[in-house]
């Protein structure tokens, strides 16, 4: 089996966790699913030889793990700094710039105390990752991010847009 095929299979597994993540309301459950997904995504990029994205994926898994225990702005700043260091040391041109930018958005999202802001910032970061994944030549990763956005929007609608059911009193 080629590295490309294996990478696409890993993205398939990540897709399952991404879709599941935003169907939860509880922030900790959302983040726990994202830890697993980020690990598979990182391995996917390793197989494709896109090292900035691979290292940022590992950093995302560490960041999500940290976010289960704290929403400290200092920790957030530390992860943003590490994002810039990784992106600089593994620079691959536009892909690194896109990955770095997307990761900054998702880092701020991860450290948000409220799931509503987490969803909004993840939406922006994910849109940037779609562009990255298209340019990186990974159709399954583009699909994954599109499904992630869809799942995020469905969850957002369910919890924040859908009107409350009216209760009729006799």
Image: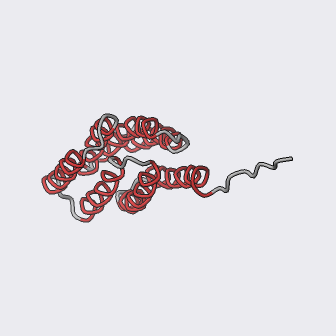
Q: Position of residue 137 (x, y in %)?
A: 38, 56
Residue at the extreme front of the image, as rendered: 170
Picture quarter containing residue 37?
A: top left
Q: For this view, does 81 lie left or right of residue 115?
A: left
The answer to which image quadrant residue 95 occupies is bottom left
Give how far across and how far down residue 86 sits, in percent.
17, 50
In the rendered view, tell whether residue 41 sits above or below residue 156.
above
Taking the image as shown, residue 40 lies to the left or right of residue 151, namely left
| Horizontal arrangement in the rendering, residue 85 relative to residue 147 (left or right) | left
**Residue at the limit of the structure toward the right, as seen here:** 170
Q: Nearer the viewer, residue 50 or 107?
A: 107
**Residue drawn at x 41%, y 56% as measured from the top left:** 126
* Coloring applied to the structure: secondary structure
Q: Position of residue 97 (x, y in %)?
A: 25, 63
Image spot of residue 26 (x, y percent): 48, 39
Residue drawn at (49%, 50%) of the image? 148
| Residue at (21, 47) in percent of width and height | 79
Residue 118 vs residue 149, the one in the foreground: 118
Vertical placement of residue 155 versus 38, above or below: below
């Amino acid at each position: 089996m080629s590295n490309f095929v294996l990478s696409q299979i890993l993205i398939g597994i990540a897709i399952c966790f991404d879709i599941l993540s935003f169907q939860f309301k509880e922030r900790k459950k959302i983040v726990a699913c994202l830890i697993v997904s980020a690990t598979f995504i990182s391995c996917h990029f390793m197989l494709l030889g896109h090292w900035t994205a691979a290292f940022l994926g590992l950093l995302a898994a560490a960041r999500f793990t940290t976010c289960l225990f704290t929403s400290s702005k200092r920790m957030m700043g530390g992860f943003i700094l590490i994002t810039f260091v990784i992106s600089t040391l593994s620079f691959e041109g536009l892909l690194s710039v896109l990955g770095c930018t997307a990761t900054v958005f998702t880092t701020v999202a991860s450290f948000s105390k409220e799931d509503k802001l987490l969803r909004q910032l993840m939406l922006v970061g994910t849109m940037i990752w779609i562009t990255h994944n298209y340019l990186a030549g990974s159709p399954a990763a583009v699909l994954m991010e599109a499904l992630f956005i869809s799942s995020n929007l469905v969850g957002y609608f369910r919890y924040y847009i859908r009107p409350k059911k009216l209760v009729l009193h006799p």
